[in-house]
Image (tube, rainbow, N blue to C red):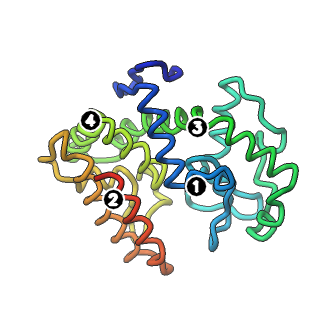
Amino acid sequence: MQRINDTDRTESGISISSKEANSIGKKIWINECGGTVEGLTSWNKGEYFASLGIGHFIWYHKKKRGPYEESFPKLVKFLVSRGVKVPKFVFNQNCPWETREDFIRSKNSSKMIELRNLLYGTIPLQTEFILLRLENALPQMLSAISDKSRRGVHSNFYKLTDTAKGKYVLMDYINFKGEGTKKSERYNGKGWGMLQVLEVMNRNATTESAPKEFALAAEKILIRRVKNAPKDESRWIKGWQNRLKTYH
């Protein structure tokens, strides 16, 4: 993918202007971090990994991995490919903090400040990174489903890419809940990613109504996730619903 100029069309045919990209990046930053610099380095209560950058990209430590997509190392490689100098402790490394308590205690450490400065200084590139993930998502999704389902998913995807709001919806949700193609991201065999939402989304949606229809479908999918979860995830649903309201 090329750098976002005044108006770029990506390899997947997604046309996005620098103004749109900046606006979307800011919204994702608000959704994930409250739009704060401190929020760029987070470790949520009850989780066993750090959540970093505007997209709260996951970074696992060496003692415990998980089923979710580990996106922070991929972001680091992307930044390096763009000529960004990154701290040695983040390149090809596991998260140096092994517990949330350790992470919080290190809030004002030199490593944490260096990490926070890196993330604050690369917000536009992080937006590009999320767009790159979206570009690559459609072929992955289509290859994971039957011929019968492909037409509807393809149609709904491109209805959303036709508007600035729709592009925000797709970029935010893929960052929020993933593509939906990983077998490890399932409860009782049911996923909650972008693919699952596009599959159940109203196929009669218009370009104008598509963002709202996506939000309605996403709410159903996330409620299903909570019902199927092996542990109680009900505490998250209100926040998820509030986030989906920004898609309307």
Residue type of the residue flagged with mark 4: Tyr
Q: Are marks 2 and 4 in contact (CB under 8 Å)?
A: no
**Relative to 223, is 34 above or below?**
above
Residue type of the residue flagged with mark 1: Cys
Is residue 192 found left or right of 113 in the rendered image?
Answer: left
Sequence order check: which comes first, mark 1 or mark 3?
1
Is residue 50 found left or right of 180 in the rendered image?
Answer: right
Q: Do the residues labelled 1 and 4 touch (CB within 8 Å)?
A: no
Sequence order check: which comes first, mark 1 or mark 4?
1
Q: Where is residue 224 in the image (x, y as percent from the top left)?
A: 34, 71
Q: Name the residue under label 3.
A: 126
Q: Mark 2 points at which residue?
A: 245
Q: Position of residue 195 (x, y in %)?
A: 34, 50
Find the distance from the CA under tag 3 to the CA under tag 2: 23 Å
**Other-residue count near label 3 (Cα within 10 Å), few / some / many at <14 / 14–19 / ≥20:** many
| Viewer-side residue, 223 vs 147 | 223
Sequence order check: which comes first, mark 3 or mark 2?
3
Residue type of the residue flagged with mark 2: Lys
Q: Name the residue under label 4.
A: 158
Q: Mark 1 points at which residue?
A: 33
Q: Where is residue 241 in the image (x, y as percent from the top left)?
A: 37, 65
Q: Is mark 1 on a helix, strand or loop?
A: helix
Is residue 8 found left or right of 32 in the rendered image?
Answer: left
* Number of on-image labels: 4
Residue type of the residue flagged with mark 3: Gln
